[in-house]
Amino acid sequence: MSATFPTAVPPFRSRIGRDARSGYYAASRRYRLHLVLSCPHSVQIAVVHGLLGLDDIVPVTLLPAVPDAPGGGHRALRPLYEASAHQHPGPAAAPVLSDGWTGRIVSTHAPDILRDLARRFGGDGPELLPCGAEQAVEDVARLCEGITAAAQRAGRWDGDPAARATALATLLDALDELQRRLDGREYLLGDGPTLADVQAWATLLQLDTVHRHHLDAEAVHRITGHPRLWAYARRLAAHPAFGSRIDLDGIARRHHAQCRGREAAGAAVPIVDWAAYA
């Protein structure tokens, strides 16, 4: 079975508003991101952070690839969790957007963090969430969630072979749809990268570096039958904001630490040579 990753329970979901009346509002160096580059949600946030050039505005703390606290999560994040919710029941997991002024967590919900970085801290960076594109970005996000869920089901060797075959068919259909959305374009929604591209790229990275290990060789061969999609993944990986966020060693260590599923023949050859871009 493909690896699963701990998430905060319940999530913290405050938002960054427009001004001081919002409570949390955009201010240089007020906030900090706590990320794990072996986590697909953190990778998305790190890519957006890089595309927007936010190093001097929203600092980043990178945490170890493998959770180091009992029950998952990171010991370094526990004080933030405890300050934000006494005796927080879940793991102190990344990603986290914290507020340095209050010492509390603003959000652990990756989609909200992505949107707030794009809308409140965009500055001179690319318009990652163009006005009017919200639904299209959400549609791609749901499609990516479907790809991940289908890949996990297709990699289960402890269940019904027919269920695996159905999951693989669902995965291939979703990849077909994602490739159709490119429609010969360089990006999914226009002339420049958006949150949709960040989400799609992180999903393809995860599919190749984690879920592929639990698929047989024939399944991987069929997945590679989307040449425009994988060429798109390579093209984005060549961009520093994407490629510099690839932590292959960390992804492998996190996967091996948390996954007890059977490795299959598809593990033999990666679809993309990600190391060439990292």
Image (cartoon, rainbow, N blue to C red):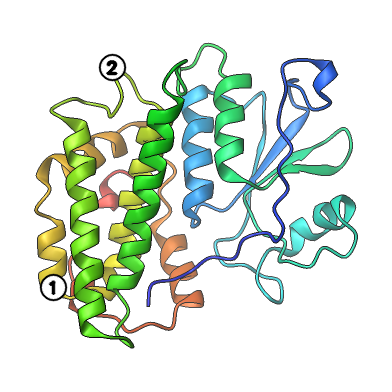
Residue situated in front as seen by the camera: 62 or 261: 261
Label 2 SS: loop
Count of marks placed on residues: 2
Answer left or right for 163 relative to 131: left
Q: Residue furthest top?
A: 124
- Of the pair 244 and 259, the residue shown nearer to us: 259
Estimate how packed mark 2 is, as few (under 14), some (14 to 19) or many (20 or more) residues with alpha carbons within 10 Å: few
In the picture shown, does residue 157 fall above or below 195?
below
Q: Which tag, 2 or 1, sits closer to the chain's start?
A: 2
Residue with the mark numbered 2: 191
Closer to the camera, 197 or 268? 197
On screen, residue 18 versus residue 210, left or right, reads: right
Residue carrying label 1? 217
Q: CA distance from mark 2 to mark 1?
A: 35 Å
Q: Does the rendering let one see residue 243?
A: no
Residue at (57% x, 44% y) in the render: 110
Q: Position of residue 23 (x, y in %)?
A: 84, 26
Q: Is residue 259 above or below residue 116?
A: below
